[in-house]
Amino acid sequence: MFGSSSGELTPIGFRQFVPGHEGARLQTFAYYASGPEVGADIASLLALIAAGRLETRVVLTVPWRDVGQALDALRQRSIRGKAVLTVTE
């Protein structure tokens, strides 16, 4: 697995990544959605979490007004897991 949350390139030597499988390929996948169907997707994910079938690793919870703190921690990779922003009325 690799990611790009830091904005830095992640070099992968293909022949080192898949030795002995020169016919293999790396394929990316991205999923972006909006609209009413997103609510159903979120409900499904929450049900899996509640049932203990999906592990979440929340390591930072801050109020929305402190979004900068969360972004800094993610950019600097000083946390290993998810950052959650809480919203109150």
Image: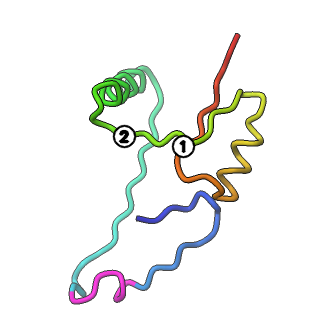
The residue closer to the viewer here, 35 or 13, is 13
Label 2 element class? loop
Indicate whether 61 appears above or below 10: above
Q: Position of residue 62 (x, y in %)?
A: 68, 32
Colour approach in the figure:
rainbow
Q: Position of residue 50 (x, y in %)?
A: 34, 24
* Residue at 71% in and 28% down: 64
Magenta-highlighted residues: 14-20
Horizontal arrangement in the rendering, residue 75 relative to residue 46 (left or right) = right
Instruction: Assess disc 1: are there few (<14), some (14-19) or many (≥20) residues with their C-alpha within 10 Å of its C-alpha.
Output: some
Horizontal arrangement in the rendering, residue 85 relative to residue 40 (left or right) = right
* Residue at 22% in and 83% down: 23
Q: Quadrant of the C terminus?
A: top right
| Residue at which label 2 appears | 55
Task: Give amino acid for label 2.
Answer: Glu
Task: Give amino acid for label 1.
Answer: Lys
* Residue at 52% in and 79% down: 11
Indicate whether 35 appears above or below 5: above
Q: Which mark is residue 82?
A: 1
In the image, residue 16 lies in the stretch drawn in magenta: yes
Alpha carbons under labels 1 and 2: distance apart: 11 Å
Q: Which mark is residue 28?
A: none
The residue closer to the viewer here, 41 or 83, is 83
